[in-house]
């Protein structure tokens, strides 16, 4: 429970405090993202870094999902599906990415 004397003197005091905190968080987060982006790329300067190695399969999946034609130009960008259930007999699995080839006359 908050005490009544905890309230700031005015809305402007809240805005000033929030603006300072937001700037600090935004700057720190931006710097973090820049570090991750510099390491998590093809031709990384440090492929042993955790930023590069963590969730590598998911990272590759996200890149292919953005543009499946990088894998095969014949694949349709309009028909790419994630996490598709797959069954064979009594076995069950999940296909990470399922895509179809573009055919003449079909939208791609």
Image (spheres, rainbow, N blue to C red):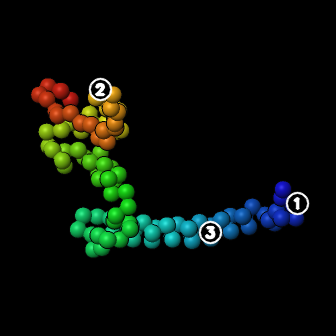
- Residue 18 in picture, x, y percent from top left: 65, 65
Identified at 72% across, 64% down, the residue is: 14
Q: Which mark is residue 47?
A: none
SS at badge 3? helix
Q: Give the camera-side residue of 51 and 63.
A: 51
Q: Which mark is residue 21?
A: 3
Identified at 32% across, 53% down, the residue is: 57
Disc on the earlier residue, 1 or 2: 1
Mark 2 surroundings within 10 Å by alpha-carbon count, few (fewer than 14), some (14 through 19), many (20 or more): few
Q: Report the Cα–Cα distance between label 3 and label 1.
A: 23 Å
Disc on the earlier residue, 2 or 3: 3
Tag in front: 1 or 2:
2
- Residue 96 in picture, x, y percent from top left: 31, 42
Identified at 32% across, 71% down, the residue is: 48
- Does the CB distance between marks 2 and 3 fall below 8 Å? no
Residue farthest front in this picture: 90
**Residue, disc 2:** 89
Q: Give the camera-side residue of 52 and 1.
A: 52
């Amino acid at each position: 429970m908050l005490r009544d004397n905890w309230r700031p003197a005015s809305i402007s005091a809240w805005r000033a405090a929030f603006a300072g905190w937001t700037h600090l968080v935004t700057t720190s987060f931006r710097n973090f993202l820049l570090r991750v982006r510099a390491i998590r790329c093809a031709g990384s300067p440090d492929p042993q870094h955790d930023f590069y190695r963590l969730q590598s399969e998911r990272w590759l999946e996200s890149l292919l999902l953005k543009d499946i034609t990088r894998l095969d130009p014949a694949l349709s960008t309009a028909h790419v599906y994630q996490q598709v259930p797959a069954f064979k007999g009594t076995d069950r699995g999940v296909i990470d990415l399922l895509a179809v080839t573009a055919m003449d006359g079909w939208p791609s």
